[in-house]
């Protein structure tokens, strides 16, 4: 296999090319976000329908089920976003509101060397990220673990998993330098020809008593606010028995 830093550069370029060539015009979806602020002693569930114009991330949003409409950036982040490229991310929270700002930069394109059979010495290619292969990585499905060099300030990709069918990232985890515990984990899928953040569930109901009903394909389950299954997943009939037993009174 080629050195991992070069493999990462090639994956970045492939992702940037696809991202620029296949943008959706508009996206509509429903998001369910649980926000916690321990320092403020506050937690909030945000259930929101979103219709977003992808080019400038201008969204019309409605808090569910019957809230008012508002406009702004898609919350929490637009589902068409390449975190391997340049971006700026910030957030603000107080007792009344939570604001997240995402500024997407230009897709990153790295110069890569041409194969040269006469080369007998390998040196690091990238001075920002120290990449290494995870034990389960393969030539057809990369799994890269990345450490930042001293040149990096702020977010960096700490883990990237390649989809063996599309050869685009299926999972990207971003962390922050300097010992901060902030992280962003994103799962991706090609849907209708677009590389987008993958919806975790086909259906997700609002939380009730700390649990929410979720569906994906032909299975159902109950998740807690951390996204962990408290029950299931299982089939529809079994879920109906649980709801009738535990959620009705």
Image (cartoon, rainbow, N blue to C red):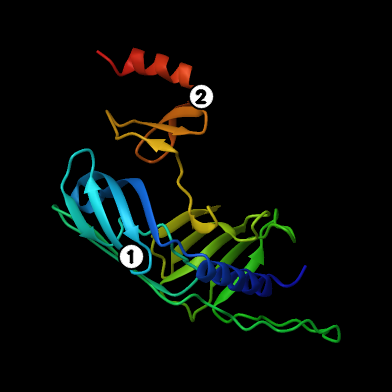
Q: Where's residue 182, x and y in %?
A: 38, 60
Residue found at x 33% / y 65%? 57
Instruction: Give the residue displayed 19% in from the left and 55% down from the top.
Output: 70
Q: Earlier in the sequence, mark 2 or mark 1?
A: 1
| Residue 146 appears left or right of 106 | right
The quadrant of the picture occupied by the C terminus is top left
Q: Residues within 10 Å of mark 1 (few under 14, many from 20)?
A: many
Tell me which corner region of the image, top left, top right, bottom left or bottom right, holds residue 45. top left
Residue 73 place in picture, x, y as percent:
28, 62
Task: Name above or below for residue 202 compared with residue 195.
Answer: above
- Where residue 102 appears, x then y in whole percent? 33, 67
Q: What kind of element bears circle 1? A: loop
- Residue bearing mark 1: 57
Judge from the rendering whether residue 212 lies leftward or rightward of residue 97; answer left or right: right
Residue at image mark 2: 234
Residue placed farthest to the bottom in the image?
118
Decide: few, some or many residues near mark 2? Use Cα within 10 Å; few <14, some 14-19, many ≥20: some
Q: Nearer the viewer, mark 2 or mark 1?
A: 1
Between 146 and 179, the residue placed more toward the observer is 146
Residue 209 in the image: above or below residue 109:
above
Q: Secondary structure at mark 2?
A: strand
Rendered location of residue 80, percent (x, y):
43, 61
């Amino acid at each position: 296999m080629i050195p991992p830093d070069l493999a990462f550069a090639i994956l970045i370029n492939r992702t940037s090319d696809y991202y620029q060539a296949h943008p959706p015009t508009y996206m509509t979806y429903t998001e369910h976000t649980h926000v916690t602020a321990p320092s403020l002693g506050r937690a909030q569930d945000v259930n929101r329908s979103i219709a977003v114009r992808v080019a400038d991330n201008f969204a019309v949003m409605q808090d569910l089920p019957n809230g008012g409409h508002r406009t702004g950036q898609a919350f929490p982040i637009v589902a068409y976003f390449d975190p391997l490229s340049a971006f700026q991310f910030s957030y603000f929270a107080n007792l009344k509101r939570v604001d997240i700002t995402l500024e997407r930069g230009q897709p990153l394109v790295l110069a890569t060397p041409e194969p040269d059979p006469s080369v007998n010495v390998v040196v690091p290619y990238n001075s920002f990220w120290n990449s290494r292969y995870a034990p389960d990585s393969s030539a057809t499905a990369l799994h890269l673990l990345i450490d930042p060099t001293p040149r990096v300030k702020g977010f960096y990709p700490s883990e990237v998993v390649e989809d063996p069918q599309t050869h685009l990232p299926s999972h990207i985890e971003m962390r922050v330098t300097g010992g901060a515990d902030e992280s962003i984990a994103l799962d991706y899928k090609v849907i209708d020809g677009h590389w987008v953040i993958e919806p975790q569930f086909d259906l997700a109901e609002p939380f009730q008593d700390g649990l929410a009903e979720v569906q994906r394909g032909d299975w159902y389950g109950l998740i807690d606010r951390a996204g962990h299954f408290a029950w299931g997943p299982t089939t529809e009939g079994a879920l109906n028995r649980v709801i009738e037993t535990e959620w009705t009174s």
